[in-house]
Image (tube, helix red, strand yellow):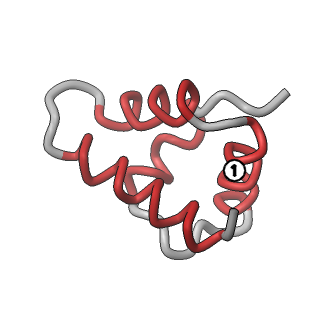
Amino acid sequence: MSQEKLIRMANQIAAFFAVQRGDQAEAVAAHISESWAAPMRAALLTHIAEGGTGLDALVIAAAPQIRPPG
């Protein structure tokens, strides 16, 4: 999957949870951890570690709570 598609998908998840009640970053992290395959999570976490260009701030905030692959 392309990096651009991962960024778009992560940002769509963030946009959905941004208007929800509760801990929005936790909700983003939970959704990604439960719904994304390990290689997708790995690619996202690598992108975040490299600066996270193009990602919504809520995705960046969720990063520490995203289950690492493996």
Depicted 46 relative to depicted 3: above or below: above
Residue displayed at 22% across by 46% down: 18
Q: Residue furthest front?
A: 1
Q: Is residue 70 left or right of residue 15?
A: right
Relative image position of residue 21 (x, y in whole percent): 14, 28
User: Is 37 drawn above or below residue 42 in the view shown?
Assistant: above
Front in this rendered view, residue 37 or 18: 37
- The residue under the point 47% across, 54% down is 10
Please name the residue that numbered disc 1 is placed on: 45
* Residue at the image position 75 percent from the left and 36 percent from the top: 38
- In the rendering, at what x and y percent does residue 29 appear? 49, 33
* Residue nearest the viewer, comparing 69 with 57: 69
Residue at image position (67%, 70%) is: 2
Query: What is the quadrant of the C terminus in the image?
Result: top right
Is the residue marked by circle 1 packed among few (<14), some (14-19), or many (20+) residues within 10 Å? many
Quarter-wise, where is residue 36 in the image? top right
Tell whether 41 sits left or right of 15. right
**Quarter of the image where the N terminus is located:** bottom right
Image coordinates for residue 11, horizontal then vertical, percent = 40, 59
What's under tag 1, amino acid-wise?
Leu
**In the figure, is residue 30 to the left or right of 24?**
right
Q: How many marks?
A: 1
Residue 62 vs 23, above or below: the answer is below
Q: Label 1's element?
A: helix
The residue at the far right in this view is 70
